[in-house]
Image (cartoon, helix red, strand yellow):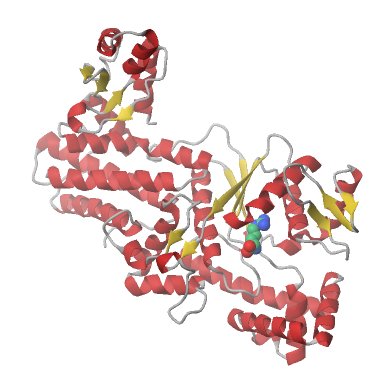
């Protein structure tokens, strides 16, 4: 709710005693907001609604900010803010460096676990979603003044490395000459051989033990696999323009030394028990226990995540831990949070939230495939988009498509729709932003000084835009709270649509005096709102397109 709306709401509630539940008016002639509070009260009190409405209107004190309220239809109250009130609220954004996005007075340490691809494998579309969503949440929480610590929990440990290293040795490959694509092929050959060749399977299993016990030769090859993977990941991050770098790497292997301690603590406080040779934690509400240590002594993905929570709370001092991981891992995270709570790793006051996102689907809702029929890699997606548009526009298309529908929903990767400059797309917002620049450039070329104040706001299209612009700050806070970037997308889209209507209906440079100054100021405020908002989505806002 905008602060203007909040003020209005509070004033009405002072009279009615209940929330007036203001809704944006459906037509300009109904004003700016409408309330059905009289209808609800009338029902309770058994009185005629129009009578109740007019009694409320008589008692309302809004004259300083609004026009006289109007009674409409069966008992609705229509409200219209004064043009001056709207003008000064929108003007504030022009003099405020932060465009209305205030710093929080309760800064938190927020760990965001995102991207997290797996070593020796190319990133797939799931990692793309995690990277884009995580980057946007990082930007939003950072701009509000929280301390964000990104953690890239890459999959750099586990039995697959036994196979990989053994295959490298078996084939006599120079690990220095590998790249990510060839390492991936290598893994395919290794798993084939593992299934058919018993001796190889035995050696591969032994290789896992060697890796875990710190055998130098094995470690050296493993390190090299990480190096080539990191280089490929960083190339993708640079291409995407996200704020992830090597400082944020905290892969599964970084918790190796903590695992034994975690197990010790779980045993000491009675959280974990031995069941059929495995160390398990049973928590209510889950149909399977969490296996902390397998009967062969190995640790799995869950144990590592417990160690990660413990580290994030104890060493990084997190107040809030956010995991941006696909919805298919929901059971895993629900259970990790429950066990961590039970074990005391996640004390009250520290929140852990799983931001679960859906799948990216191909045409017709099927699995996403390349033209050749292979599984779609992240780089294939980016290439496909860049075939249709310049890199900045292609990226905007992909990121916006990813962020603008509810995260939980699967979405279809329809590149033609995504890069279109009409409709609810990233490029549409970029165009709206570039158009504000175009007007301002023309004004400058004509020697017109850029105004800092909106004074005249007579046209409904001007008012509709001015009503939206001061809302950026609250929308950003809403995203920080709910972790739903689509709210910001929806808001920016509303602004872009309101701007187009304004631009069609209200000539800017062909008007004069205070009207022209106010319209230019509206263009400037719109430009700043769109640029700031797009930046928080991780989307570039070029001045020209
Ligand atoms: N590497 C995992 C995968 O690709 C994602 C890791 C997510 N983060 C975590 N703390 N478990 O599925």
In-image side of 373 versus 79 (left or right): right
Q: Is residue 13 visible?
A: yes
Q: Position of residue 451 (x, y in %)?
A: 22, 39
Q: Position of residue 424 (x, y in %)?
A: 32, 53
Q: Residue at x 66, y 51 (%)?
A: 331
Q: Residue at x 45, y 49 (%)?
A: 406
The total of numbered circles placed on residues is: 0
> Dividing the image into 4 quarters, which one contains the N terminus?
top left
Q: Is residue 452 visible?
A: no
Asked if 543 appears above or below 372 in the picture, the reply is above
Q: Position of residue 136 (x, y in %)?
A: 49, 52
In-image side of 207 versus 58 (left or right): right
In-image side of 326 versus 190 (left or right): left
Q: Residue at x 58, y 60 (%)?
A: 115
- Looking at the rendering, which quadrant does residue 386 occupy? bottom left
Residue found at the very far bottom of the displayed protein: 172
Q: Nearer the viewer, residue 67 or 484?
A: 484
- Looking at the rendering, which quadrant does residue 259 occupy? bottom right
Q: Nearer the viewer, residue 98 or 197?
A: 197
Q: Residue at x 68, y 73 (%)?
A: 226
Asked if 490 appears above or below 223 in the picture, the reply is above
- Looking at the rendering, which quadrant does residue 162 occupy? bottom right
Q: Position of residue 59 (x, y in %)?
A: 30, 7
Q: Nearer the viewer, residue 106 or 6?
A: 6
């Amino acid at each position: 709710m905008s602060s203007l709306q909040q003020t209005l709401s509070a004033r009405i509630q002072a009279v009615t005693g209940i929330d007036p539940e203001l809704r944006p008016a459906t037509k300009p002639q109904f004003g700016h907001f409408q309330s059905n509070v009289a209808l609800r009260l009338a029902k309770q009190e058994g009185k005629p609604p129009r009578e109740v409405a007019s009694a409320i209107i008589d008692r309302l004190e809004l004259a300083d900010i609004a026009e006289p309220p109007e009674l409409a239809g069966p008992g609705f109250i229509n409200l219209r803010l004064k043009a001056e009130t709207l003008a000064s609220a929108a003007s504030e954004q022009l003099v405020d460096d932060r465009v209305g996005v205030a710093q929080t007075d309760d800064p938190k340490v927020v760990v965001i676990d995102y991207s997290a691809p797996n070593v020796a494998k190319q990133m797939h579309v799931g990692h793309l979603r995690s990277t884009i969503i995580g980057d946007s949440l990082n930007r939003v929480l950072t701009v509000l003044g929280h301390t964000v610590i990104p953690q890239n929990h890459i999959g750099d440990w586990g039995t697959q490395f036994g196979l990989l290293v053994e295959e490298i040795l078996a084939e006599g490959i120079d690990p220095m000459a590998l790249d990510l694509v060839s390492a991936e092929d290598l893994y395919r050959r290794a798993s084939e051989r593992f299934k058919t060749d018993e001796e190889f399977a035995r050696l591969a299993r032994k290789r896992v033990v060697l890796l875990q016990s710190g055998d130098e030769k094995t470690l050296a090859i493993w390190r090299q696999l990480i190096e080539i993977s990191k280089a490929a990941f960083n190339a993708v991050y640079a291409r995407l323009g996200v704020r992830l770098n090597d400082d944020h790497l905290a892969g599964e292997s970084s918790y190796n030394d903590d695992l034994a301690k975690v197990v010790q603590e779980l045993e000491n406080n009675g959280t974990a028990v031995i069941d059929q040779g495995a160390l398990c934690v049973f928590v209510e509400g889950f149909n399977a226990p969490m296996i902390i240590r397998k009967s062969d002594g190995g640790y799995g993905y869950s144990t590592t995540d417990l160690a990660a929570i413990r580290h994030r709370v104890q060493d990084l001092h997190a107040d809030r831990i956010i995991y941006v991981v696909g919805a298919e891992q929901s059971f895993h995270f629900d259970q990790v949070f429950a066990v961590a709570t039970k074990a005391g790793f996640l004390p009250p006051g520290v929140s852990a939230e799983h931001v679960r996102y859906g799948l990216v689907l191909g045409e017709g809702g099927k699995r996403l495939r390349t033209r050749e029929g292979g599984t779609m890699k992240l780089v294939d997606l980016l290439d496909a988009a860049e075939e249709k548009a310049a890199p900045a526009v292609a990226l905007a298309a992909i990121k916006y498509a990813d962020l603008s529908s509810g995260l939980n929903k699967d979405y279809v990767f329809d590149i033609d729709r995504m890069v279109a400059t009409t409709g609810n797309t990233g490029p549409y917002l970029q165009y709206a932003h570039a158009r504000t620049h175009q007007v301002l450039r023309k004004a400058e070329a004509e020697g017109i000084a850029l105004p800092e104040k909106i004074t005249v706001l007579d046209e409904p299209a001007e008012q509709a835009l001015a009503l939206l612009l001061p809302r950026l700050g609250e929308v950003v806070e809403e995203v920080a709270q709910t972790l739903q970037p689509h709210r910001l997308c929806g808001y920016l889209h509303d602004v872009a649509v309101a701007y187009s209507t304004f631009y069609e209906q209200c000539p800017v440079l062909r008007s004069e005096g205070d009207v022209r100054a106010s319209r230019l100021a509206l263009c400037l405020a719109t430009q700043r709102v769109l640029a700031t908002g797009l930046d928080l989505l991780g989307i570039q806002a070029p001045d020209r397109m």
